[in-house]
Image: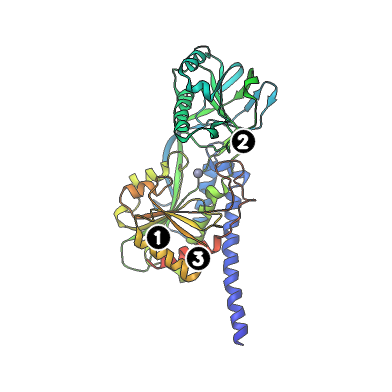
Amino acid sequence: MKKIACLFFVFLISQSNYCQLSYAKKNVKKLSSKKMKGRGYVKGGHKKAALYIANEFKKHNLSGFNDNYFQTFYTSVNTQPGKISLTLNKNRLKPGTDFLINPSSPSIQGEFKTTYLSIEDIFRKKILLKKLDSSANKVLLLDLQKSNEISKDNKNKLNDIVNYLIYSPNIKCKATIIFKNEKLTWTGSTRENTKASFTVNKPTDVKTITTVNTNCESLFLEKEETQNIIGSVNGYSELDSTIIISAHYDHLGMMGKKTIFPGANDNASGVALLLELAKHYSQKNNQPKYDIIFIAFGGEEIELLGSKFYTDNPVSPLNKIKFMLNFDLAGTGDDGIKVVNATEFMNEFDKLIHINKNNSLLPAVKPRGPACNSDHCFFYNNGVPCFYIYTLGGIKAYHDIHDKYKTLPFTAFENYSQLLKLYIDAF
Ligand SMILES: [Zn+2]
């Protein structure tokens, strides 16, 4: 009998783990699907994702603020919703795979002659100035394919000069193309530059490129309405402190009509973790001690705008926050987790280590100092104790077209969420 009861218990636990994982997978699959358009500002991707998350909040009966879950704010943002093509001599490159357009690029269309610059040219002032002099209305080709061979100091200098060439209105070229041997990593931009820029990662004899054909349609949105999604669960204690659980749901959206950045790990996975915790703590038996406010931030990929807006307009006083846990990149965990601000909040970090060890959950819980690299940043700057936690190991995909649901391993997801529940309960 005992044996059967025990087996049944194991079955229940594995069932609940299984449920956790299937709920998380369902959410990541949905949020990184084609329908969500990469959760950026092309075809309303961010709005679709926001509605989906609000609907999940509703399913879990979270309380809203101001009658709903949305905290609206506005931003400018540059987008690439239309055509996107880049042809070097006769070779048409594949968007997302072979090249990226700089997200701040304005529209550009036409056939252009080229000016070639090697790393050596860039460092020789006389040659650089001479070449720039004759580059008006041409496309500058910056051949940085061998930049791995130069020293770190020189690399920094090179980056500064390259940025000047890309962004300075004093440079009269029509556009710049950077040729690199590094993984393509895209970003977002709230600004529109005066000229277009591209990054190419495809082994190329750049010197032989004499013509560039391109047709890219950008659209600068001056005042785009976007939002944070906020819901809460009441704690059972009379204490007026709150715990904040957050994860950003926005991502990079689309580059042209077909190329989507799905953002499965960044950060559909973090939202899935937030939703798992929301689901858990909204159940009667799991009522938390403190009120928990769940925030899915918008605008993270464009200068952390959603969390900036929230800390300027909090729905509950910032000085009542007992602790904040921000999740970004929650979908791997093969090598454990990294905890930003561990060195600032040693007691809280020790407790996390302790709980992990006692329950043998993750292979490692590693400390890191403060870093303004996700939505915890403005909270931390406002004196709120907080951790930003991300998973380690697994896939290499990041800010590219390969960050997909299909290849996201979810290696440690159940143990990670289990650790967080035990940790939150221990506050
Ligand atoms: Zn990101």
- As helix, strand or loop, the secondary structure at mark 1 comes to strand
User: Would you say 16 lies left or right of 163 here?
Assistant: right
Comes first in the chain, label 3 or label 1: 1
Q: Is residue 255 above or below residue 53?
A: above
Q: Amino acid at mark 2?
A: Gly
Label 3 beta carbon less than 8 Å to ligand 1 = no
Q: Residue 418 got which mark?
A: 3
Disc 2 designates what residue? Answer: 96
Whether tag 2 and tag 1 are in contact, CB under 8 A, the answer is no
Q: Residue at x 62, y 50 (%)?
A: 405
Whether tag 3 and tag 1 are in contact, CB under 8 A, the answer is no
Query: 10 Å neighbourhood of mark 2: few (<14), some, or many (≥20)?
Result: many
Label 2 beta carbon less than 8 Å to ligand 1 = no
Disc 1 designates what residue? Answer: 292
Residue 142 image position (x, y, % from top left): 55, 24
- As helix, strand or loop, the secondary structure at mark 2 comes to loop
Label 1 beta carbon less than 8 Å to ligand 1 = no
Q: CA distance from mark 3 to mark 1?
A: 17 Å
Q: Residue at x 51, y 66 (%)?
A: 361
